Image (cartoon, coloured by chain):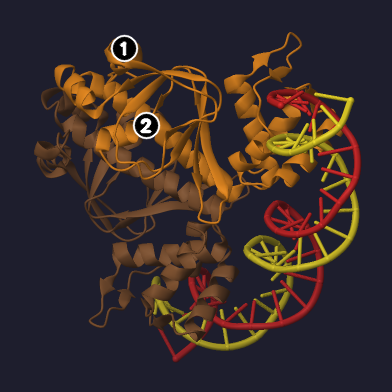
Chain colours: A orange, B brown, C red, D yellow
Amino acid sequence: MPLSLTTDLTEDTGFRTLLERHGRAVEFASGQTIYGTGDEDSTMMLITKGRVEISRTSSDGRRSILTHLGAGDMVGELAAFDGMPRSADVVAATRVHGLVLTRAQIAGLLKDNPEAALGVIETLCRRLRETSAMYTAHVLADGQARLARLLLHLAEKWGEPLPDGRRQLSERFSQSDLGDLVGLTRESVNRQIREWEQAGIVMRQGRGLVICDLAALLGVAGSAE
Amino acid sequence: MPLSLTTDLTEDTGFRTLLERHGRAVEFASGQTIYGTGDEDSTMMLITKGRVEISRTSSDGRRSILTHLGAGDMVGELAAFDGMPRSADVVAATRVHGLVLTRAQIAGLLKDNPEAALGVIETLCRRLRETSAMYTAHVLADGQARLARLLLHLAEKWGEPLPDGRRQLSERFSQSDLGDLVGLTRESVNRQIREWEQAGIVMRQGRGLVICDLAALLGVAGSAE
DNA sequence: ACGACTTTGTGAGGTGTATCACAGCGCAGC
DNA sequence: GCTGCGCTGTGATACACCTCACAAAGTCGT
């Protein structure tokens, strides 16, 4: 990378730091709705603690979870940047602490620190890549592969590594949640996980899950890459 | 919208104008690959004429088309902004004329015109909303609804309105393409369109398609909104 | 106008997931 | 303790969509 848009403007010295400096501290109880689809407000929030779920619900009540975000992630930036209505629901999946900024503050910050805009662009690019990848994965891969991928991704983002190379996922994801994250029913998720459990690929440990055989899951996930 | 990030910075006075002024004119024949997945180059292109297809192909050869873009749209911005490898293929669907900018030029332009970054942010936000919507649509809606939605969208973007409220789509989209755009097989697309034709909802006209009953398609599309 | 290639049309049969229906389980609260 | 209530486990059945197979029609190059 010979020339760089970003070398001297990492997120740490840019937009995120501004949020940390100027945001108003807020707190949400688990289950509380932070932003609702269609809302016209345009604040955004930097999560400092906890986990939120971003989802959409169809008219017939079925839910698609786009992702879960945690400490260090931003939510609600789209509405904050472009002023359009909220396009998804954001619900606290645990108790959540965050720092809130209004659209007005953001406009001011970007005006005073034009370089911070580059950090924002980079963040949006990453999100765009992730979302596109999710889309094609969903179109091209079957349920089994998508679920395998999801477990690997969740273990990576929320889990802790165990000494023997296995990976512990202690955060609580119900089988319904897993289903809504990959577009399967709870029953299908159950049957698949059960099957992997029998095969020794994963293990249940109280409320959590342990991935015993990363390679096996990678195989299933990659089969339709 | 009391305060605005963008009022005085519409795309016409911002980034897009810079592209038009500084881009190098290029041309591609129909079918030619413009960018390939994994490529490390980081130019972008403003399309001035023609239509390009953005797609990904799985290891087993199945293809998912993300979208088609045309005159006035930008392609390849992700790699140009963040310097990462290309995440999708871009192929000319017709003869294509465009204006190319390198990452270096973009860095320079954004440095000299910090306000243009806001236009870029807005564009990325729109893309992100669209992509998220595509994802949830694919998860929540069945094939029929997705195809109905696609036809409405294509007719909107590429079609011309007919005097009697119907809508003409003369651009050439094969049934395979339609399938790859919504994640159905060519055969399924064929059967569905045939059914709609029988019901008088659409009509074939030589190489094109005419949507006779917008409302009916909207009904099918919305059933799983 | 010719063959080669792409696109469209259609049937038979298979399959991955959804749906429905219920039973067991675990935990929170009274 | 018992009583809900949400989560998990599992079978039977249904159906949307895929796969394969092949024929017909259109399109393009020379």
Q: Nearer the viewer, mark 1 or mark 2?
A: 2
Q: Which mark is residue A17?
A: 1
Is residue B134 shown left or right of residue A191?
left
> Which of the two discs, 1 and 2, labels the residue nearer the N terminus?
1
Q: Secondary structure at mark 1?
A: helix
Tell me residue A142's x, y (percent). 66, 48
- Foreground of the two, B150 or B32: B150
Choose top left, top right, bottom left or bottom right for residue A100. top left
Taking the spot 49% from the left edge, 44% from the top edge, the residue there is: A56
Q: Is residue B55 in sight in this rendering?
A: no
Taking the spot 59% from the left edge, 49% from the top edge, the residue there is: A140
Q: CA distance from mark 1 to mark 2?
A: 17 Å
Q: Can you identify the residue that label 2 sits on?
A: A76
Three-letter code for the amino acid on which mark 2 is drawn: Gly
The quadrant of the rendering that contains the N terminus of chain B is top left
| Marks 1/2 same chain | yes
Is residue B134 shown left or right of residue B77?
right
Tell me residue B75's x, y (percent). 31, 44
- Foreground of the two, B166 or B174: B166
Check the residue under mark 2 and report the chain it is in: A
Choose top left, top right, bottom left or bottom right for residue D12. bottom right
Tell me residue B108's x, y (percent). 16, 25
Q: Secondary structure at mark 2?
A: loop
Tell me the crowding category of disc 2: few under 14, some 14 to 19, or many 20 or more residues within 10 angstroms, Cα based. many
Tell me the crowding category of disc 1: few under 14, some 14 to 19, or many 20 or more residues within 10 angstroms, Cα based. few
Taking the spot 30% from the left edge, 62% from the top edge, the residue there is: B157
- Foreground of the two, A88 or D24: A88
Residue A192, compared with residue D23, is above or below; it is: above
